[in-house]
Image (cartoon, rainbow, N blue to C red):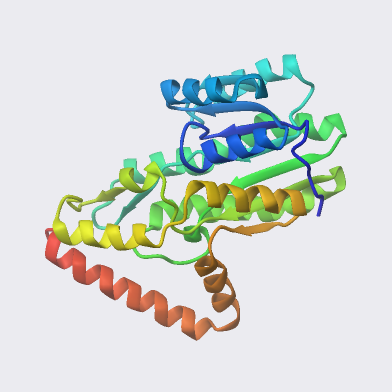
Amino acid sequence: MRRTSFDGAVTLVTGAASGIGRAAAVQAADRGARLVLTDVQAAALDEVADRLGPAVLHHAALDVADAEAVQALADHVHTLVPAVDVVMNVAGISTWGRIEDLELRHWRRTVEVDLMGPIHVMHSFVPPMVRGGRGGHLVNVSSAAGLFGLPLHAPYSAAKFGLRGISEVLRFDLEGHDIGVTLVCPGAVATPLVGTVDIVGVDRSDPRVAATVERFERHAVSPERAAAAMLRAVEKGRHLAFTSPDVRFGWYGQRYVPFGYDLVMRLANRRIRTVLRSVAPPA
């Protein structure tokens, strides 16, 4: 697959105001990229743009779930350059919950942001890359929840498995245009997303829930480390990028030791059910 250098590359980063997106923007700028940045958090995005200064070609606050806003961004960017060279879909939200607690609005919002959001970005920015004929790179940030059947992750996994499927198709569809496709599958990452996960039907302030979240955070890698793994994968032309060894181990275990994967998922689910029985009201 195509190896892509960030030096001089016009690079779009969504979710650039915090977490992996912010770290990716900083590291891409350090490599000489010219950045187009977006995030739903206007003030925090302005702060990142101010910090990176001349490296930022353009920045705009928007919700990637808003197709018209994404297209307006693309229309403006394409008055500055014929096409971007690298698209990095990082923006996302996370919603967890038992099927009996989830409402349609939880499913819909997660899919709108985490799946339709990247689709809006790809729809607006990738065809000009194809027409431009200069190649490039598409990066989609999925998740360990796009690989594994993690407890309570059904809405999040619906979106992240979908993004994984799109990336698998485009990996081959775009190869003839010299556009590489990298799918990033982070595990636990110490980003603001951890603190804003909507666990439907559960009181996050309960000490038992807080202890479970704390155990999760102890295994989390920094956003900088996750972003570095993502950028290395682009530079080395890798389709799959893992940000921590546990996800890589799980991926190979799922493929080559399926009974072990089944056992781990069942044990994890049993543990979560035990916690939920003590903190959540019955359905």
* Residue ID at (76%, 34%): 85
* Residue ID at (53%, 33%): 16
* Nearer the observer, 157 or 12: 12
Horizontal relation, residue 281 to residue 210: left or right:
left
* Residue ID at (66%, 29%): 124
* Nearer the observer, 88 or 170: 88
Figure check: 114 above or below 134:
below
Horizontal relation, residue 269 to residue 164: left or right:
left
Q: Quadrant of the N terminus?
A: bottom right
* Nearer the observer, 112 or 47: 47
Figure check: 53 above or below 101:
above
**Image location of residue 238, percent across then percent down:** 73, 57
**Res. 3 in view:** yes
Horizontal relation, residue 145 to residue 141: left or right:
left
**Image location of residue 255, percent across then percent down:** 59, 77
**Image location of residue 168, percent across then percent down:** 68, 56
Q: Quadrant of the C terminus?
A: bottom left
Figure check: 73 above or below 225:
above
**Image location of residue 32, percent across then percent down:** 73, 32
**Res. 283 in view:** no
